[in-house]
Image (spheres, coloured by chain):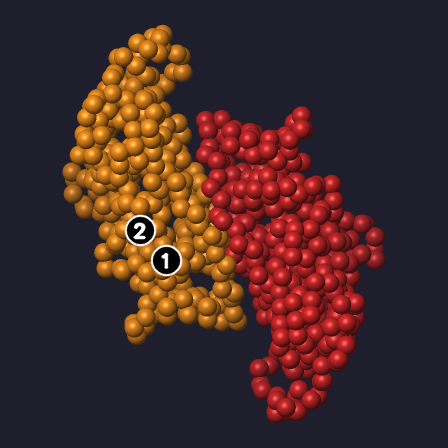
Chain colours: A red, B orange
Amino acid sequence: MKILVTTVAVALPVAAALAAQAIPEDLRETARATFKALPSTTPAVANNPITREKIALGKAMFFDPRVSASGVFSCNSCHNLATGGDDNRETSIGHGWQKGPRNAPTVLNSVFNIAQFWDGRAEDLKAQAKGPVQASGEMANTPGQLIATLKSMPQYVEWFNAAFPGEADRVTFDNFAKAIEAFEATLITPAPFDHFLNGDDAAMTSEQKQGLALFMDKGCSSCHAGINVGGDGYYPFGLVEKPGADILPEKDKGRFAVTNTPDDAYVFRVAPLRNVALTAPYFHSGKVWDLKQAVAIMGTTQLGEELTQEEVDRLVAFLNSLTGKVPEVAYPILPAETAATPRPVSQILGK
Amino acid sequence: MKILVTTVAVALPVAAALAAQAIPEDLRETARATFKALPSTTPAVANNPITREKIALGKAMFFDPRVSASGVFSCNSCHNLATGGDDNRETSIGHGWQKGPRNAPTVLNSVFNIAQFWDGRAEDLKAQAKGPVQASGEMANTPGQLIATLKSMPQYVEWFNAAFPGEADRVTFDNFAKAIEAFEATLITPAPFDHFLNGDDAAMTSEQKQGLALFMDKGCSSCHAGINVGGDGYYPFGLVEKPGADILPEKDKGRFAVTNTPDDAYVFRVAPLRNVALTAPYFHSGKVWDLKQAVAIMGTTQLGEELTQEEVDRLVAFLNSLTGKVPEVAYPILPAETAATPRPVSQILGK
């Protein structure tokens, strides 16, 4: 399937175009019933009380490339806070220059997703944090080696002691994951859309509001709903019409690999759309770079509808209102290695 | 040659050991004649007036992985401000998982070095900044592709306009390099040693002061002098006795490749020793991980002297007083790509 998004201007004058879709008076009310504004403070997470100490430790480890076997990759390498919380690549590059199987999702606001990874195989961020560390094509590390690395640096041990007081064994893989989760829970990005939901009419432009109305009218919000405008359920990619194999590679059956249920073939966690304007390329395959093209594809595959150029533009205008403010993060100064710190290993296993 | 650094305690009681080397009364004066304290403000650099706008632009580009062809490596990947301004690897890993030929030197205080790179082949940081971007085994980019990348993002163009007002062509490879240099010039790390030089007796411990006295007595400061305690001249590695080929690989003839002068075979820029405790592994080959071992090797190869364990310990105590305070850096939020931004390329040329 080939999607053409032309940039030929539509011949309607602007006034007529605006009139073609008035902004409903109850737009905010309707939107509030479907979406939810981000909180202004760090949310609570299950089984992991958030403390300043945990956040500080988690931040250090999030930025520490020594979490990977090679010393080359940190969490921030693929979930870069400077570039929308992802890495702007089709799929990430990891240990030994191996390419990952799926596009790296943004870490921003990820605490609000129903589960983590494109197939939802990790129930929360603390479960997710254990994945890339051990993946042979990503950080290629082991829990044992990671803990040996952290324990070799007295400053890290002190930070773990402060973050997990009262625990017998503090520097553990579980606590590593919990601290990462605590830091990631702070990465929430209030956007013009939130200010609008909270009552500020001027926060969104008319075109963005029209786009929001259209987003709900067309049924996009049947799947992309909730606090993350997505991220809270599972749906087949190609609900109405499957996209081409370039965009939906046949061998990646999504959630089927998690549930082993035939109905879950090509089912993925609905992409959360916050900051979507910053997180190209799109879809789990990372094959689509243009947000307008991505929206048009969604029209065809999920709604069974060829959206007009004007509709696509309006929807994208709305999506732009989801670009939020990333919290300011001071780049951390990390503990220095000691003689006991395991040396970086760049060899690829079996080579 | 094999260097053994034993950790067997010397049998002298501490008092006797201290008495064995009194701290000279004129230590500060002598040290001031050899070294120089870091300034408290960003220094001026040649042909590149430093402005806030240039620093901000340079910081963004220093942290931007899109400076590399693959979108994987930023300047900060190998010169990581979180870990002493380097990458704690023997040699760095770059495009296509290629290993670099020499250990990555720290960016911290590098503005004060006589020239850049281990062989001094770049006269200043703006010349240096152009190297890794184009090296096929590092960022594997081209100036044309880099400028196309930067020009594709309106925010970068605005930043260049602000940093280089009055210039006809602002987004250029030269200006990229100048902005990087401006940011790097801010990366200076005042240390206890500086406070001591500036008159604070309590800034250094007795052992550190003894180490400083020994550093000058033994002749270490014949080469490691000036504001960066090194970095301001060129000397042969193995002045008295060549280290083994594991540490000084035969095929890397250092500055000989720059000057083509036989006298310059195995000549390198003297390592600047600020933050040396954070920048293992050591030497251009990155083959030595233990600072004590590195000091002992220097004793043999440069001074022709087998240093005692106690001497090594004292020298290392002094070196620890060179660990400074890295300026706080807010992690930047980078401009988002546009449709015109060149896509990341991870293929290796010729493969």
Looking at the image, can residue A230 be seen?
Answer: no
**Pointer 2 chain:** B
Closer to the eye: label 2 or 1 = 2
Q: Which residue is located at x 33 percent, y 11 percent? A: B15
Q: Quadrant of the N terminus of chain B?
A: top left
Frontmost residue, B221 versus B123 = B221
- In the rendered structure, the answer to whether residue A139 lies left or right of residue A26 reads left
- Residue B250, by quadrant, is top left
Q: Describe the element under mark 2 as helix, strand or loop.
A: loop
- Residue B240, by quadrant, is top left
| Residue A237 image position (x, y, % from top left) | 74, 64
Q: Amino acid at mark 2?
A: Thr
Q: Amino acid at mark 1?
A: Ile
**Pointer 1 chain:** B
| Residue A241 image position (x, y, % from top left) | 76, 71
Q: Which residue is located at x 74 percent, y 47 percent? A: A123
Same chain under badges 2 and 1? The reply is yes
Q: Which residue was labeled with disc 2? A: B42
- In the rendered structure, the answer to whether residue A328 lies left or right of residue B263 reads right
Give the numbered dot on residue A10: none
Q: Which residue was labeled with disc 1? A: B55
| Residue A79 image position (x, y, % from top left) | 57, 52
